[in-house]
Image: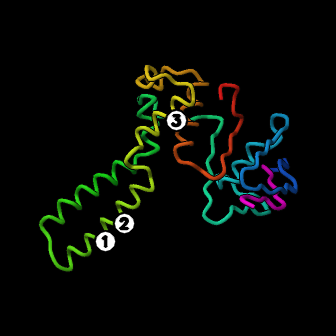
Amino acid sequence: MILSCHHIYKSFGTTEILKDISFHMEERQKIALIGANGAGKSTLLKIITGEYSADSGEVVLAKGKVLGYLSQHQDLAVESTIYDELLRAKADVPELEQRIRELEQQMKHTSGDQLESLLNTYTKCTQEFEQKNGYAYKSEVTGVLKGLGFAESDFTKSISTLSGGQKTRVALGKLLLLAPDVLLLDEPTNHL
């Protein structure tokens, strides 16, 4: 089991939105929440992500698993290009690369115990860099964009010029680059 909800209740004022909601999700399983507007689908997703708290009940995410959430409304940097917006999902990679370069410079001028300490830090940083696909993260961004139907000529388009569906695909691309174990899509449009 990767995710479970047990006896979730949620009210806003005197209006009960969710009443005794329970389910569980296994690895690689797909689940759809279907209901009329105002039925509480988005509320349940926000409880699962921790954005809202339930009045009672429990949400359990398996240890070490990561949630990804694509909301109905995208939070994108409108002044950014499509490509740069996806790079933001990998912002820690170039920062880590810079840290590695700084450590390399420091090690050139260090010896003894201090060098050993720097080497340990360097090893941890390079392992993390490799784990985060540091040598190929730009190719990964390009692959995700192409997989979502963007041509290379689209990569330099400003977010502010995109349609709602295109913005949703950009937001999904950012989420895919983070590789969550559970992907929650709140009203994923036909554009996906």
- Residue tagged 3: 144
- Name which residue lies at 43% across and 41% down: 88
Q: Choose the circle earlier in sequence order: 3 or 1.
A: 1
Where is residue 145 drawn, in percent x and y?
A: 51, 31
The image shows residue 154, relative to residue 98, as above or below, that is above
Q: Main secondary structure of the magenta part?
A: strand
Residue at x-position 70% and y-position 25%: 190
Identify the element where label 3 is drawn.
helix
Q: Quadrant of residue 87?
A: top left
**Which mark, residue 124?**
2
> Dot 3, crowdedness within 10 Å: few (<14), some or many (≥20)?
some
Residue 183 falls left or right of residue 104: right
Amino acid carrying label 2: it is Lys
Residue count near mark 2 (Cα–Cα under 10 Å), binned few <14, some 14–19, many ≥20? few
* Quadrant of the rendering where the N terminus is positioned: bottom right
Q: Is residue 129 above or below residue 176?
A: below
Alpha carbon distance from label 3 to label 1 = 34 Å
Q: Amino acid type of disc 1?
A: Asn
Q: CA distance from mark 2 to mark 3?
A: 28 Å
Q: Which residue matches tag 1?
A: 120
Residue at the extreme right of the image, as rendered: 20
x then y, percent, for residue 23: 83, 56
In magenta, the rendered stretch is: 1-12
- Number of residues whose C-alpha sits closer than 10 Å to that of mark 1, classed few (under 14), some (14–19) or many (20 or more): few
